[in-house]
Amino acid sequence: MITVEGLTKKYGSTTAVDSLSFTVTPGRVTGFLGPNGSGKSTSMRCMIGLDRVQSGTTLFDGQPYEKLKQPLHEVGALLDAGNAHAGRTARNHLRWLAMSNGISTKRVDEVLELVGLTDVAKKRVGQFSLGMKQRLGIASVMLGDPKVVILDEPANGLDPEGIRWIREMLKHLASQGRSVLVSSHLLSEMALMADDLVVIGKGRLITECTVPEFVDRYTKKWVVVKSPQLGVLVSLAQTAGMHVSIGSDTAEFHGIAAAAIGELAAQNNIVLHELATQTGSLEDAFLEVTADSVEYHSHSEVKS
Amino acid sequence: MMSIVRSEWLKLRTVRSNVTLAIVAILLPLAITLLTAVFIKIRDVDDSTIPAVLLGSGTMSVLLMGVVGVLVITQEYSQGTIRLTFAATPHRSRVYMAKIILLFAVSIVVTSIVQVVGSFGGKAILNSRGFHGAVFNDQTTVAFIAMTIVGVLVSFLGLAIGTFTRNPPFAITTLVLWPLLIEGIVGGLLSLIFGEHMRTWLPFSAGLGSMQIRDHFLHLGRWGSVGYFGAWVVGISLIAHTVLRRRDA
């Protein structure tokens, strides 16, 4: 269980994180979502005391990070897979980390096995691909068998197979009752692995809810209708005050359920060839929710 | 605490450049000393010949200990491991303390190897060339002790400078230019204006001066100079430690 309360981080006059509060529940994967530069990484660094905050607290099962005696047993955090000395072997990289928290070398070999790096354990990290470094990072997270797992953009730079591996790993960790917080700037990725969402923009909380709630609340729904008597139906709907946009041989009805349109058609003996509810993509919903909080916009529209 | 020190020791010895540096710090003065023992005219040899060469070339070892001090912290910043270190040990004072303990041990081991192997190796060579007098005296032994302490202090100073700069080349340059260039120029000016003895008020001049066999030129005497240099190092280290604790990692 992670409880973030009023987290505020300023760099000079810039406020990177602005009184951010949210919770991460055990047994679930919580997606930490926001556009680039929205303060996800900064928040994560502040949560584990790497960056000093102006105000606010983060509690891990009621304890602030600084109070944890051997924190790797409580919280496993992967902020940047590149944080490893290129000249050290993978095994030695994990060994020094393990040693500082009284974790045995036997456990080091176990986590190397867990992430599938046993064969390259004696290779220098500098020779690793990005995917291998991510795996090494996951291994370091698992060293202390922590109850809380925090990962910053773990899927960045991974191939589809690697992304699937991360996704399944996170779901597995959550299913064991751990609290998992994972950040991303891609909602599509989050929708596949997260149960809950914490969405931020410009360092502020935008919304905190489950993934289905988010879809329900923010994605647009409309009804597409095909009919030989389309004109009649559209004018009926418009007199009833509905918002309709007309295409070449279809019409899109906004703000009304498909059933209501079906009934309207039946009452007026209108033949329907198609009556379908359409849902906007999650990506569109995310873009809409965070539109006001994107730091840098491109001003030219890309037509799709 | 010991587990953190062991972790720091593992970090130090698993990076090749650190090991190379320690070996150079040992072999350089040894090579110079032993070669001197091989080629020096026997009639010029007395009981302070070998120590003088060891202490002179040992200044390099002492400065290289400072470089090791720089590297144990700047390496962490340049490679990003500092964040893992502080995530694993959020109590940053413990990390600083562990590095201090490690540097203390490494410096003592390195300077001791230089002194013991240099002295006895030099003695063996001189003996084989027909010199059978003493190769050290009370005064040279005291200078050796001072060298060991100064080596430890310089490594601490390297750690402090590295903590401020977080950047290996910048920190190493500062550490090397300080005694060689800055104190050279400032010391030169001071002695021109106020007389020769003023130079030894500069921290490095006092520290490195205290490991000379003759200490008559030291304003504060040998141990006074060691203590004076030590006070500077402790002061700078305390500031570095505070900076480390407050700063974002």
Image (cartoon, rainbow, N blue to C red):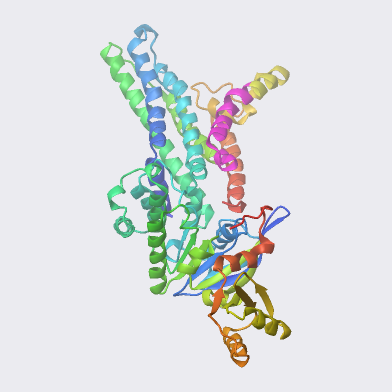
Q: Nearer the viewer, residue A89 or B146?
A: A89
Residue B166 sits inside the magenta stretch: yes
Return the x and y of residue B128 as percentages of the image width and height: 26, 14
For the question of whether residue A6 can be seen, the reply is no
Residue at (38, 66) in percent of width and height = A168
Return the x and y of residue B45 as percentages of the image width and height: 38, 12
Q: Single out the residue that lies furthest toward the left.
A: B128
B101 displayed left or right of A105: right
Q: Give the extent of the magenta segment.
A: B160-184
Magenta residues: mostly which secondary structure?
Answer: helix
Examine the rendered structure and indicate whether residue A96 appears above or below residue A271: above
Residue at (62, 89) in percent of width and height = A264
B130 displayed left or right of A66: left
Q: Quadrant of the C terminus of chain A?
A: bottom right
Q: Single out the residue that lies furthest toward the front.
A: A228
Return the x and y of residue B174 as percentages of the image width and height: 58, 31
Examine the rendered structure and indicate whether residue B222 appears above or below residue A221: above
- For residue B206, what is the image quadrant? top right
Examine the rendered structure and indicate whether residue B8 appears above or below residue A4: above
- For residue B15, what is the image quadrant? top left
Q: Nearer the viewer, residue A205 or B206?
A: A205
